[in-house]
Amino acid sequence: MSLNAGGRFELTMKRLPGAVPAHILQRITTLRLLDEALRECLPAECQAHCRAAGLSGHTLHLVTSSPAWRTRLRFHSTRIINHVGQLGNVTVTRVDIRVRRTIEAVRPLKKTGVPRTIPSHSARAFAALAEETEDAGLKGALQRLARHGRDE
């Protein structure tokens, strides 16, 4: 992440031209910036149990791992709002804290018998993007997506 001439943060990574729309990259950058700010202002014991999930209007949405952590994080809401306000490019007046659903609570997708495929040009783009990506987790996910390409 780097600061551009306009004072906004930009995601710096090798990418295929047009692979990810600019407005999505900007949202990713903003979310990463908010997540970093959140980690800076929270006590160490809270940091591992909270993530920035999004921003809508002036509301910062956070997710946490349990109702107990949600209660503890509510006590830090004012601190979070003040710290994020110091970033300059985001205005937050409210913090919404939700407990994330556990993996066991998420119902599996229904199998329809129709194989999930993507167009071959998308599969090639995912494969090429995976080659340019240094993050191992993201690289693996992109490679798995690329394997869903259909023959045309």
Image (cartoon, helix red, strand yellow):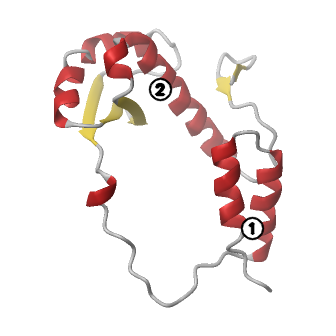
Residue 35 image label: 2
Q: Residue 13 placed where, x, y %?
A: 77, 35
Residue plotted at (45% across, 87% down)? 112
Residue 122 image label: 1
How crowded is the residue under tag 2: few (<14 C-alpha within 10 Å), some, or many (20+)? some
Task: Quadrant for the N terminus, please.
Answer: top right
SS for dot 2? helix
Classify residue 96 by image quadrant.
top left
Residue closest to the eye, 41 or 58: 41
Residue 111 image label: none
Residue plotted at (75% across, 16% down)? 5
Identified by mark 2, the residue type is Asp
Classify residue 39 by image quadrant.
top left
Instruction: Give above or below for 150 relative to 58.
Output: below
Mark 1 or mark 2: which comes first in sequence? Answer: 2
Q: Residue 134 placed where, x, y %?
A: 76, 39
Residue plotted at (53% across, 89% down)? 114
Identified by mark 1, the residue type is Ser
Q: Residue 147 placed where, x, y %?
A: 71, 70
